[in-house]
Amino acid sequence: MATSYPNRRKPGGIWKTSDITKNLKTEGTFPIGGEGSRAMWAGGQSPSNSDVMEYVTIQTTGNGTDFGNLIAGMVKTGTSDGTRALFGGSDDTYVDYIYMMTLGNAADFGNLSEQRYGVAGANNNTRSIFGGGHNGARTDRIDYQTTASLGDFIDFGNLSVARFSPSGSSSPTRMIFAGGEESSRVNTIEFVEFSTLGDAVDFGDLPSIAEFTGSVSDGIRSFIAGGQASPAFQNSISQIYIGSKGNSTDFGDLTAAKSGLAGAGDLTRGLYGGGTTPSKQNVIEYITYAAGGNGTDFGDLTVARDRVGAASNAHGGLTQVGYPRMPELYSPTGKVLPRGAASGDIAVVAGGNSPSNMTQIDFIQISSLSNSTDFGTLSRGGGMSGLSSATRLVQAGYELSPALNEMNYVTIATKGNSADFGNLTRSEFGISPAANSTRGLWQGGCTPTRTNTVDYITIASTGDATDFGNLTQTVCAGGGAASSTRALRAGGSTPSITDVMDYGTISSASDYTDFGDLSTNRKQPGGTGNGTRAVWLGGEEPTIVNTMEYVTIAATSNTTDFGDLTQARTGVGRGDNSNATRGLAVGGSTPSYVNTIDYITIAAASNATDFGDLVTASGYQASSSNGHGGLS
């Protein structure tokens, strides 16, 4: 009977209706090795160290597309288990990671056992291995770690001789180390078995001595291309059968002699990107394994560079028919992360003041009672505002001098660092945020002059903000909340402190309408809600208060008393941290910055209860959840 989706080596497989239904409901798995598979390149020298990450779709041709940035510009080596890609081996010990089918900046994975660059890397479904390199002297060390985990790398064994700049490739069972430099360049090929620990074993020889070669694999053969000989660059591509020891044989030639290239591919195509001739190259070329022969032009990298790291989510070291889609890091089972109104349960808290500009990103599981957990790092820190759909948190309104118009975002389902989203229509801070599933609204702010302008974005599409309309007054430092149809803004500074609340209809770009009044003039309240109620949390009158009050979003009116926070504070997280039941007040200033997290049951007016603590005491953070009341 046919497989339920195409086998990686037999693309004529069929889909069962039951499996299509399952994937639609659970976003479970997708076939690897076909039309959507990616190759990507990260880091390298251009001639300075680059932090650029870019990707192509392997079964097409064309130029590289920007993916995001490494934590820092470095020479790198890449591995991938089909879901994650790891980039390690540089002038530092740390290893970066990303998710191959998303876009965004890299996050910290852990550290190699020692600082070194010029390493070989490869992996199978489970393990990533980095071997060899240079740390002031050549090293024979081989490290490994489970790719799906986070943590420092562990000793695996040793190469036969300390070696710099070999290339790596793999089958599901073996990793190949090809070429490199010992006391001089060598043609040595060695291998290790993924399932064991131990030293590398001799495999055979390349046709000539070479270092900085590029390697790809279809799981049966490894194809080793280019490299620097003595002293010339070479254009030859040779092949070995990974399951059988022996010397390599000729396969074909690259389009040009080059060194420092990096290979990535799937089961039918191998791609080689970058390199030096000795000028830095942006060329991507490909080979078709079954056809044999020379390289063919594929397209160009966005930046010419060599000694770049490469990875693929479909290479020959992988055996699964399908891989999970974006792994949900909050679930030990790897099931899809619930999201949207009545189901989303993750709040992300980014940046803030403590009192310095913070770049920390935390996440909180709202239905639990627990402390926040590290999520990643912002590209720029400081006090700011945040809004979210069920999938993205967008940050804007940096409290810096001068003000900035930047917007950045993170993908809630995958831990990681922020990436650029676009720009506001103006540079300002102290913005009141609100959003539904589609649109995010940035309400008012300071430039430092108070404004009445409202911008909007389509959260699913990166790009610049667009003018939405005007508030009923020029105001800064208010609170924001929303239902799926209405955006509310409350209080703030005009520059005198105000009690005004106003609202806009999210689907129609137009001016705001008066909603009612807070019980007192107040600035810097937090906002949360469940789509029916909006609750305003703390703030300054100008003394800092513990007051909470609420409104019914569908009915214009003044506020009603809700209860009290556990302590008087202002500048709690700027954004809606809620699920269908609970709202959170995260951090803030008393005026000392605190790490307190309180929670309320939104439907029941009562005092707040202690929830747990933030990683770091802070206030004025960009924060929101994947289950707040504006979502549907």
Image (spheres, helix red, strand yellow):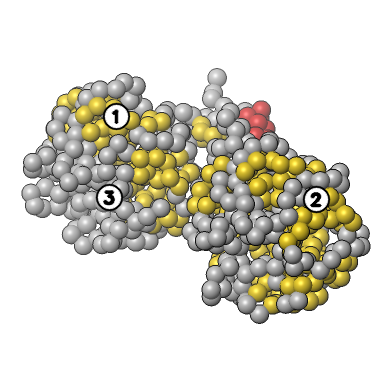
Check whether the beta carbons of the residues at disc 2 and disc 3 lie within 8 A of each other: no
Residue 377: x percent and y percent?
50, 52
Residue 57: x percent and y percent?
44, 49
Foreground label between 1 and 2: 2
- What residue did someone put label 3 on? 91
Distance from disc 1 to disc 2, alpha carbons, whole Å, reads 54 Å
User: Badge 1: how crowded within 10 Å, few (<14), some, or many (20+)?
Assistant: some
Vertical side of 500 occupied by 322: above or below:
above
- Tell me the tag on residue 155: 1
Tell me the element at label 1: strand
Vertical side of 314 occupied by 629: above or below:
below
Distance from disc 2 to disc 3, alpha carbons, whole Å, reads 52 Å
- The tally of labels here is 3
Vertical side of 571 occupied by 448: above or below:
below
Left/right of residue 243 with respect to residue 518 in the rendered view: left
Q: Quadrant of the N terminus?
A: top right
Identity of the residue drawn at 56% across and 37% down: 329
Residue 319: x percent and y percent?
42, 28
- What residue did someone put label 2 on? 564
Which of the marked residues, 1 or 3, is nearer the chain's N terminus? 3
Q: Amino acid at mark 2?
A: Asp
